[in-house]
Image (cartoon, helix red, strand yellow):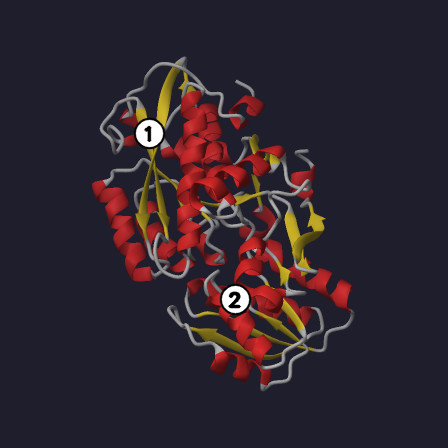
């Protein structure tokens, strides 16, 4: 079967015993493979979980409707199971235990949030189970974690090109203040952000972290502005927190350069922050309903919006692509054995929502565990969020 057919989820017919997975999948059917998801279905990042669930189920439906994942003329149907990690380490640990012990998933097709993902990873790596994730931390992948693959751009793909583009657009920037969430995602991203801005000749005048559940951002805005920065990077603020801080900054007269390195949803930002979002740069957002998006992405954006009221963004798109990637790798490996599928992921090309794709990043991480996708720089301009640059990694260009 060609990689393009895998991309369209046109895969196989018949049945397969899951002996290589250690038994039948979570549903107990011999012809079903169960993919698990750990994502926030509640709390201030719930939108990511709701969208991830729909997108993963959409990919599974496409695969199943086309016949399933074909192995030696037989087929597997894909089932999706999701547990709420509430975007915290404690709930991530509970979600992990449930997925592996009660749901008996065969692979983790998507996971969100560095702290809950690390809790899950402690089990998946020990059990030699594949895990696809959107977590940003560099420490979660590499030769020490051979079963973990990242399916969205991370700080090492985003922060430097974003910073360079902002400097190009705005001219020399003398100082910047950073703020992010006080968890593993925020702490690890803060370190990279400091390095990038310092390398670009920008003085990092302050760097602060806020706690999960914060709803009053006026004191944080006051503290940020007290350092008189020329720019502010909101780094890893969650979708619910971002408009609150932007409005607090706006109320206190901020009119400098604003970035959200991990900014994922331009449409939601405009809806919730209004004029306070004007001019903001985003590092993980793309207008998936625009002509710059692929036909598949426009289709997913329309379906997701209609089904759950969420817009497709730079985090949740990985929930779709990871299911397609696993299906392609399983077919390439000719088995559902996790070790064999892991090896196939590093060499298999497939048709993602972005177009031809594969895994790379060995120069950065020591192994090929990073999904290669374009890096999109967006900005809110005149009440619309627009793509202002699309950066294609050299490894990805070789596949296209």
Q: Secondary structure at mark 1?
A: strand
Q: Nearer the viewer, residue 89 or 383?
A: 383
Q: Position of residue 372 (x, y in %)?
A: 59, 42
Q: Position of residue 143 (x, y in %)?
A: 47, 48
| Placement of 210 over or under 135, stated as above or below | below
349 sits left or right of 20 in the view: right
List the residue tagged with mark 1.
33
Is the Cβ of the residue at disc 2 closer than 8 Å to that at disc 1?
no
Q: Position of residue 371 (x, y in %)?
A: 55, 43
Q: Nearer the viewer, residue 342 or 234?
A: 234
54 sits left or right of 15 in the view: right
| Placement of 311 over or under 55, stated as above or below | below
Q: Nearer the viewer, residue 52 or 203?
A: 52
Q: Position of residue 9 (x, y in %)?
A: 49, 25
- Residue 326: in sight, yes or no? no
Q: Nearer the viewer, residue 252 or 152?
A: 252
Q: Tell me which numbered mark, 2 or 1, is placed earlier along the sequence.
A: 1
**Mark 1 Cα-neighbour bin, 10 Å: few <14, some 14–19, many ≥20:** many
List the residue tagged with mark 2.
243
| Placement of 386 over or under 358, stated as above or below | below
At x 42%, y 22%, the residue is 65
| Camera-side mark, 2 or 1 | 2
Q: CA distance from mark 2 to mark 1?
A: 40 Å
Which residue is most to the bottom?
226
At x 67%, y 63%, the residue is 163
- Residue 6: in sight, yes or no? yes
Numbered label tally: 2
**Mark 2 Cα-neighbour bin, 10 Å: few <14, some 14–19, many ≥20:** many
Quadrant housing residue 226: bottom right
Q: Secondary structure at mark 2?
A: helix
For residue 178, the mark is: none
At x 46%, y 57%, the residue is 139
């Amino acid at each position: 079967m060609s990689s393009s057919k895998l991309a369209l989820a046109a895969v196989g017919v018949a049945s397969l015993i899951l002996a290589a997975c250690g038994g039948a999948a979570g549903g107990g059917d011999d012809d079903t493979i169960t993919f698990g998801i750990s994502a926030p279905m509640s709390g201030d990042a719930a939108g990511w979980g709701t969208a991830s669930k729909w997108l993963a189920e959409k990919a599974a439906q496409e695969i199943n409707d086309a016949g399933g994942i074909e192995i030696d003329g037989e087929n597997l149907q894909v089932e999706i199971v999701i547990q709420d990690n509430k975007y915290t380490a404690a709930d991530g640990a509970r979600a992990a235990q449930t997925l592996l012990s009660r749901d008996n998933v065969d692979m983790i097709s998507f996971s969100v949030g560095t702290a809950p993902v690390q809790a899950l990873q402690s089990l998946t790596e020990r059990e030699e189970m594949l895990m696809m994730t959107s977590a940003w931390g560099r420490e979660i992948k590499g030769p020490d974690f051979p079963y973990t693959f990242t399916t969205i751009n991370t700080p090492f793909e985003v922060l430097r090109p974003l910073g360079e583009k902002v400097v190009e657009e705005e001219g020399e920037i003398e100082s910047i203040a950073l703020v992010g969430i006080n968890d593993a995602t925020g702490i690890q991203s803060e370190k990279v952000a400091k390095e990038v801005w310092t390398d670009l000749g920008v003085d990092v005048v302050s760097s602060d972290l806020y706690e999960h559940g914060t709803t009053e951002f006026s004191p944080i805005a006051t503290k940020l502005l007290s350092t008189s920065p020329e720019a502010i990077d909101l780094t890893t603020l969650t979708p619910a927190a971002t408009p609150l801080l932007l409005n607090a900054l706006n109320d206190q007269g901020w009119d400098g350069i604003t970035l959200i390195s991990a900014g994922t949803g331009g449409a939601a930002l405009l809806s919730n922050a209004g004029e306070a979002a004007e001019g903001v740069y985003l590092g993980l957002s793309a207008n998936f309903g625009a002509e710059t998006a692929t036909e598949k992405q426009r289709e997913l954006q329309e379906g997701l919006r209609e089904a759950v009221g969420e817009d497709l963004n730079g985090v949740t798109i990985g929930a779709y692509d990871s299911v397609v990637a696993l299906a392609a790798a399983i077919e390439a490996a000719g088995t559902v054995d996790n070790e064999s599928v892991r090896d196939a992921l590093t060499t298999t090309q497939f048709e993602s929502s972005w177009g031809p794709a594969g895994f790379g990043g060995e120069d950065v991480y020591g192994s090929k565990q990073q999904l290669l996708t374009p890096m999109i720089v967006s900005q809110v301009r005149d009440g619309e969020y627009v793509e202002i640059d699309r950066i294609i990694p050299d490894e990805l260009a070789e596949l296209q």
